[in-house]
Amino acid sequence: MKKFLLLPTVLLMTITIAHTQPQSDAALLERARALHRQVPLIDGHNDYPWAVRANVARDITRLDISKPQPTIHTDIERLRKGGVGAQFWSVYVPSSLQGQDAVTATLEQIDIVYAMLRKWPETFELALTADDVERIFKAEKIGSLIGMEGGHSIDNSLGALRMFYRLGARYMTLTHSLNTPWADAATDKPAHNGLTAFGEEVVREMNWLGMLVDLSHVSPDTMADAIRVSQAPIIFSHSSARAVADVPRNVPDEILRMMPNNGGVVMVTFVPQFLSTKVIEHGRLRTAEQSRLREQHKGDEAAVTTALTAWDEANPTPRATIADTADHIDHVRKVAGIDHIGIGGDYDGITTVPEGLEDVSTYPALTAELLRRGYSDDDVKKILGLNVLRVMRQAEKVSQKLRAARGPSTMLFEKHGRRRQAIGTVFRIVALGDSTTAGTPGWRSPIEAPPHGEGDVTSQYAYWLMQARPEWDVLNRGVNRETSAQIRARFDRDVLPASPQAVVILAGVNDIYAGQPAGDVIGQLREMYDRARAHGIRVVAGSIVPYNTATPDQNAGMREVNDWIRSAAAADPNTDFVDTRAAVAAADNPDMLFASPDELHPSVEGYKRMADALLPVLARVEGRGKR
């Protein structure tokens, strides 16, 4: 009998050995593509709508993704090659936009998604439910879902939230880079220690609607509060594991451990700065070098730029990799479990990408890497889309239950006992000026660092006004390095369409710095004041703030302009003067800043003092409008 058993034994050994041999890269990639054909890859975040807004003024015909688009990450051919079955299109707008401006801009971004659906109906179809995603996938089209990136988009209004849901929004990130008046962000200073009572009501109303609660961008306290309040599973639309890469935008282990009970999904992102410790450390070293150069070359930004360019050439930025991305997936699986992982690439919202994940065509390469690491086909299917479909269905069931039990929430946003002002009575302020208004050097606006802006958001007086009076709309319209003539030239574009009740005008320092006569600055300021008053806008005239490298002649020029500003305001009942210079000046020397990161601009505390000086004047302006 042993002779008869020999052949089957040899065959069994041969089969076992064959199955334990590593598959070739080509075989793994083909296996990956087959899995993409079986279940829809649902990506949590793509910023193509923002690319349309930022690059071609919201005209999709000028960024036609039915044709190859090598300047961005996304086009239809590459989406097909990448096996994308459904995409959450982000309708992001910067969190520096506040109030009705944020609502309007978000509506415009949703309009871009609808334009895509009209333009390429053979490729894209709006998906509102999990069943829609599966039906559209079977029809070999790409299910198009809408994700809102930041609670600032609803302007503290549950009614606006409900209307966005009716337009198709199926998740909302509770914050972006700045706190909202009801939730703390990961990259802002804590203001609420998580969610306020109104923030909790936002989560409950999202549950009632069936809208997914997205916790990317929020602080750990906000994460924990939202998970505690939510009756439906939450998502992280584009975040990774903080234990692997310690940055505020990633998810801490204590939150990952909550996923099994909540049922939520962490959609691992491809942002290199959230993936690779080498990239993170390089960024820290570069920031330190930039600070050192600014100290070395005080007041000479050209020298700083030249030296920093040389440093960049000598210290090229390292690349994150597919392996880095898979390491984060491994960690989420280890801590939260295989049922709580998804994919959220953030394509066209990032300027650099991991090596091997260059655009939307490369998802199968990541799938192949997971297979190489021993993930089963069933595991991979969950990561690609089945986990997200489960979350969507659970959210839909929770919504059905809640709608059967109650109607929509009637809560209004409150701050210190005051109810939110009705539409049409919101007090709006335009902050107009140069870098002193923009927030340079601590904060770079989304215009200067697209798409999201970067730096310390507290380095702008507009931020501190909004923190003190969140019911106000404060629109930062500062532009770095501009002269008073350049600021006046854009007055009609940047002030009048906003229909503000007040405009804070701070201009002239760059003219004086360049040696222009004070009389020229006064002429430009007079034109701006007259223009504002002609349109019924109250002028809040700020004095030029000092800078530490000013010569005696430059200080004399600033004093001449400031004396005129003070006298012009005193002579006109429709103009208010605020001594912003005194707010930031050293106690023992009015021609010096009391603190400065670069000898040219106020410190964070200085910007806060500017806001403190402006607040009582603006409050009086608001009070006049209510009488």
Image (cartoon, rainbow, N blue to C red):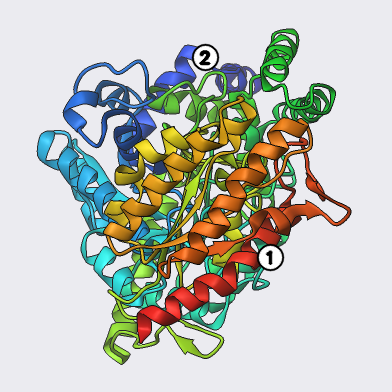
Q: Position of residue 280 (x, y in %)?
A: 72, 32
Q: Position of residue 495 (x, y in %)?
A: 35, 51
Horizontal placement of 247 versus 293: left or right? left
Q: Earlier in the sequence, mark 1 or mark 2?
A: 2
Horizontal placement of 603 versus 201: left or right? right
Q: State whether residue 268 is above or below residue 621.
A: above
Q: Position of residue 207 (x, y in %)?
A: 39, 74
Please give the residue where the numbered disc 2 appears in the rendered image: 25
For the point 40% across and 80% down, the residue is 624
* Mark 1: secondary structure: loop
Other-residue count near label 1 (Cα within 10 Å), few / some / many at <14 / 14–19 / ≥20? some
Q: Position of residue 125 (x, y in %)?
A: 17, 44
Please indicate, yes or no, whether residue 4 appears anywhere in the rendered image.
yes
Please name which of the two marks, 1 or 2, marks the residue nearer to the observer.
1
Q: Quadrant of residue 59?
A: top left
Please indicate, yes or no, whether residue 223 appears anywhere in the rendered image.
no
Quadrant in the picture for the C terminus: bottom left
Marks 1/2: CA–CA distance: 47 Å
* Mark 2: secondary structure: helix
Quadrant in the picture for the N terminus: top right
Horizontal placement of 300 versus 207: left or right? right
Horizontal placement of 399 versus 267: left or right? left
Q: State whether residue 582 is above or below residue 10.
A: below
Q: Nearer the viewer, residue 423 or 199?
A: 423
Instruction: Residue type at mark 1: give it.
Output: Pro
Q: State whether residue 442 is above or below residue 166.
A: above
For the point 76% across and 35% down, the residue is 598
The label number, if any, that marks residue 190 in the structure image? 1
Instruction: Residue type at mark 2: give it.
Output: Asp
Q: Quadrant of residue 396?
A: bottom left
